[in-house]
Image: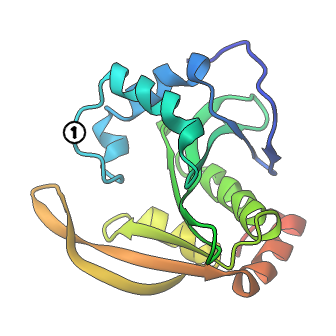
Amino acid sequence: MGTDIQHPIFIQGHKTILRPLCKETDLEACYHWLNDSEVTNFLTIFLPQSKLAESRWFDELPQRKGDIVLAIETKSERQFIGVMGLHRIDWQNRIATTGAFIGDKTCWGKGYGTDAKMFLLDYGFNQLNFHKICSQVIEYNQRSLNYSLHCGYKKEGRLRQQVFKKGRYWGLILLGLFKKNWEPIWQRYQKTGSVK
C-alpha cells in the first residue's frame, strides 16, 4: 500500500514521522486496517467500516476542532503504518486524550508506537501547552497499557464492564499524564531512544 508521494513532515521522531493524513494515499490502508479483526480487537470499533464511510471521515477531519489526527510513518522507509491523534480536546482546560493504532501488523512490537507517542506528547505539552493528556485502554490490551505506563501515564481509574468484546464485557482503564511526570522520561528518551 506504499506510494511515491512524499508527504510533508510535521513531527520527526527517532523511528517515526507524524504527518497530516492524506485521503488520496491513506484511505485504502485505513479502510483495510479498520476491517481487520486483529487490529480492531484493540479498538472500540465493532462494525464493518465501508469505504464510503471512511472517505467521509477523511472529508470531515478539517472541521473537527477537537481532534488533531496524524499519520504515522516509519522514518527510514517513509512507510505509512498507522494513525495517532489528540482527541476530545478541551482548549479551555488544556486537556486532551490520545488515541492510536498501528495498522501494519508487521510493525507491531518494534517501538514505533512508543516513538510516535513520545513525540506527540512533546507536541501536546510543549507546543499546545496542554495541562494534562489522558488515554484509555481496554483491560486486556496489555501491550498498549505497558507502553502508556512507560511513557509516564498513571492509572486514574477503571470503568467496569464498559466495552463488549470477545463475547463478554471488559473494563476500560483510564490513564492520565501531567507534563512534570513526563519530562524526565522525555529527557531520557531524547538521549537514549528508550523510555526505560
Q: Is residue 101 above or below residue 26?
A: below
Residue 19 x %, y % = 72, 38
At x 28%, y 39%, the residue is 37
The quadrant in which the N terminus is found is top right
Q: Is residue 71 above or below residue 4?
A: below
Residue 31 x %, y % = 40, 26
User: Please, which residue is most extreme toward the top here?
Assistant: 4
In this rendered view, identify the residue nearer to me: 61 or 104: 61
Q: Name the residue under label 1.
A: 47
Residue 161 x %, y % = 18, 74
**Quadrant position of residue 165:** bottom left
User: Please, which residue is most extreme toward the left here?
Assistant: 167
Q: In this view, does 26 lie above or below 67?
A: above
**Quadrant position of residue 158:** bottom left
Amino acid type of the residue tagged 1 in the rendering = Leu
Neighbour class for label 1 at 10 Å: few (<14), some, many (≥20)? few
At x 71%, y 37%, the residue is 74
At x 34%, y 27%, the residue is 53
Residue 15 x %, y % = 76, 47
Can residue 166 be seen here? The reply is yes
